[in-house]
Image: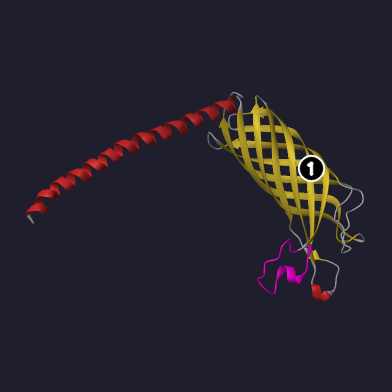
Amino acid sequence: MALTRATRPLLVALATTSAALAALVTCPSRAHAQSQESAAARRASAALEQDYTHTLVSVNAGLLSLPAANVCPRSRTSCEKGETSFSLGVYNQYRIGRFGLGASISWAQSLLSGTAPGAAELDREHDRSYFLVEGQLRYYGIQSDKWVWWGGVTLGAVIIRDAWTVVTDREPAADTAFVGPRAATLSTEGLAPGLAIGGEWTVAPNWSLGTTLRYASWFLPTEPVQAPTGDSASLSGRVDMLEFGLLVAYRLAL
């Protein structure tokens, strides 16, 4: 008991000293991190206001529409006019003054899936997705305290994937893993030049919210690709595309 009572003040003193040392180490680290963050925020604000060189990374979600396209999901004699898909994209830009040069990757999935020709017991279904890789040149023509507005041109490639599945693909009878996709697929590639406009609203030194509107003309093969099963690609020839999106962007000064 005497040893315990004697060592108790020593243990308390050691604990207090350790806490004080930890606070001394942590406080400068936090202060340094906050100082770096504030400096980065100031540089980002100055880059936007004074057209300094900086980079911009944005993520956008929206709707991709083919308003006048002849979409033929079941056969070349059974076509529908137009289609709308949900799209997601990532854009990375290097900006010098009022000009921005960057590239984007976007993916879209058709909101509708339909039946496909075949025996009734197969319960065949068809769906379609899009993959775009594009370069983009922007000019920031209008700039205010919080808002910037731009226009630009795009050039890239589009890949359209048509997939046909049967009921056993979607609801396999066993958990056996097979090699390869569980669908019959066709891929159609084409060139995609276009135009784009948009605006961004600065909500924080490094962050902004915005909107984009894009038009592109897809140049696809005039004859649709055929599958061994007798199915054919849904789209062919020239197709007009419109995309509206909302974005979140992060700005980093160089």
Q: Quadrant of the N terminus?
A: bottom left
Q: Nearer the viewer, residue 220 or 38?
A: 220
Identify the residue under disc 1: 157
Of the residues shown, which amino acid type is indicated by label 1?
Answer: Ala
Instruction: Return the x and y of residue 165 as percentages of the image width and height.
Output: 77, 66
Quadrant in the picture for the C terminus: top right
In the image, the segment drawn in magenta is 164-182
Point 92% across, 61% down: residue: 77
Q: What element carries label 1?
A: strand
State yes or no: residue 249 in magenta.
Answer: no
The crowding category of the residue bearing disc 1, from other C-alpha atoms within 10 Å (few below 14, some 14 to 19, many at least 20), is some
On screen, residue 223 versus residue 30, left or right, reads right
Residue nearer the viewer, 180 or 201:
180
Is residue 167 inside the magenta stretch?
yes
> Image height check: is 104 above or below 179?
above
Residue 25 percent coordinates (x, y): 32, 36
Q: Residue at x 69, y 34 (%)?
A: 102
Secondary structure mostly taken by the magenta-highlighted segment of the chain: loop
Residue at (70% x, 40% y) in the render: 104
**Residue at point 59% right, 28% down?**
48
| Vertical relation: 226 (above or below) 237 | below
